[in-house]
Amino acid sequence: MLQFNRQSIRSIHKQKGFSSVEMGLVLLVVALLVVAAVYMYRDNLRKTSVNNNMMHLTSISGSLRSVYGQANQYANVTTAIAVSGAVVPKSLRNGTATTATNTFGGTIEIAPATLTSANDSIQITWPNVASDQCQDIVMGVVSEMRKVQVAGSDVKPLDGQINLGTLTTQCDSSPNVTLNFFVGRS
């Protein structure tokens, strides 16, 4: 028959639960997993926003070239005409109004512009862009554009190459920046 003394019973009782150190380690691991999940979620939201903006800008620029460029009508295009003509995606239009707002809450403006000859292009103004998304958006659509400005400075001169130094500086110039894209005949 087994005999237990008080010392061995106490030893058995001490080993039943988690020690405070073990519990602390478990809580630390759980906290790290939560932090990692939140970081991944926020990064995924940022990437989704970048992709949506690139998709909208590519769609708008392609439609502007195809609808108004083929007919040599850049001089007559306004935001209202582009919105009414379904050049601006429905998800950006402000209800039945002839205005549109980008995903950052900035009012989109579309107007004739002159790059080499009168009214040979259209300027798309994309305001209120979060600085942490600016570079990704510009780099994603730069090949579609003849000229690109960030915060009023040329980051891609007319039909030239993008200047990464200027892009970085201008995107970081404030928490929210305005992007100007020029689409048109070359």
Image (cartoon, rainbow, N blue to C red):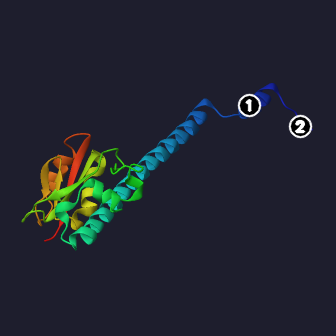
170, 183: nearer the viewer: 183
Query: In the image, residue 104 lies at what x, y percent?
Result: 34, 46
Query: In the image, residue 10 lies at what x, y percent?
Result: 76, 27
The amino acid marked with disc number 1 is Ser
Q: How many marks?
A: 2
Toward the right, the furthest residue is: 1
Toward the bottom, the furthest residue is: 70
Q: Residue at x 22, y 47 (%)?
A: 178
Left or right side of 106 for 148: left
Query: In the image, residue 126 lies at what x, y percent?
Result: 26, 51
Residue under numbered circle 1: 11
Q: Residue at x 31, y 45 (%)?
A: 106
Left or right side of 2 for 105: left
- Categorize mark 1 by other alpha carbons within 10 Å: few (<14), some (14-19), many (20+): few
Residue under numbered circle 2: 2
Which quadrant would residue 182 be assigned to in this image?
bottom left
Disc 2 to disc 1, C-alpha distance: 16 Å
Left or right side of 50 for 20: right
Quarter holding the N terminus?
top right
42, 3: nearer the viewer: 42
Which quadrant would residue 120 be assigned to in this image?
bottom left
Residue 31 sits above or below residue 112 on the image: above
Q: Residue at x 78, y 31 (%)?
A: 8
Question: Is residue 145 among what the camera can see?
Answer: yes
The amino acid marked with disc number 2 is Leu
Residue 63 sits above or below residue 98 on the image: below
